[in-house]
Image: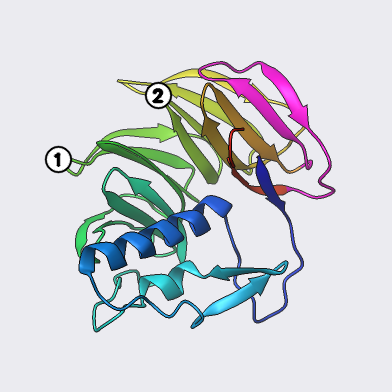
Amino acid sequence: LESANAHRRTPGEDRVHALLEVRVLSLWCERWVALRGGKPLDLTVGLNTWNGVHTLSTQRFLTMSKTSDAFCGHTDSVRCVAMCGDLVASGGGDGTVRVWTLDGVQHAVLTGHGAAVASVAGQLGRLASGGDDGIVRVWDIGSLRCVAALRHGAPVQCLVFAGDTLYSGGSGGAIRVWQGPDWSLAATLRGRFNGVRAFLSHKNSVLFGGSDGVIRQMDNGATDVVATFTGHTREVLALAASGDF
């Protein structure tokens, strides 16, 4: 398990919202080069140092290319990125969700959020987006329709699919569990964590990082905490699985 907590940034550094985002960008870049069969991107351009780790800012990546192609479209900062089958979804400060093919073509622009989109989560055939408007939207990728608009009740900062279950979390200090296929509210979890900034679905577990610096583990589809991981002294901002965890 890898996690990241709050970091005091210098003015020149970009905010890294999730380790998953960095991994997605790395995968995306590798597949771009493999599919397009061209000269690899110079990843030293636009790199910033964050806690000694080199990361490529999302907005910079979405406007970089090996030739004249570009992942352009958002009119404000890119807040989140996620894989959705063979497509890539991004959410922005402009309130839109944009869906891209792996060769950089904008496949769709999904609208409906009344504020910035701070989180996206993908699964084969469907996508979820969470906004500062406190709404979680579930999209059918085939028809590009919004099939559900779910009221989380506070700005949504993280989402994760675990099979037919969708978890949403944010600054309001509640985790809401939505059950497909109709995405009805199955449970609400509250605790001392106050806010939730990161989710991870791995094997048969869902983990989340709280503003209290504690990582908690639940079984898929459940709300009982079965394990805790402590050590961070500030809020947990990102989670990712590594190796055989």
Q: Which residue is mark 2?
A: 163
Mark pair 1, 2: CA separation: 20 Å
Mark nearer the viewer, 1 or 2? 2
Q: Residues within 10 Å of mark 1 (few under 14, many from 20)?
A: few
Give the residue at x 50% y 24%. 177
Q: Position of residue 205 (x, y in %)?
A: 57, 24
Q: Position of residue 191 (x, y in %)?
A: 73, 27
Q: State the residue position of label 1.
A: 143
> Does 214 appear above or below 86?
above
Q: Specify start and end residues of the magenta stretch as a single range.
A: 212-235
Residue 28 visible in the current orientation: yes
Q: Is residue 200 left or right of residue 11?
A: left
Helix, strand or loop at label 2? It is: loop
* The one of 81 and 241 positioned closer to us in this rendering: 241
Please tell me how crowded label 2 is: few (under 14), some (14-19), or many (20+) other residues with Cα within 10 Å.
few
Q: Is residue 57 above or below residue 192?
A: below
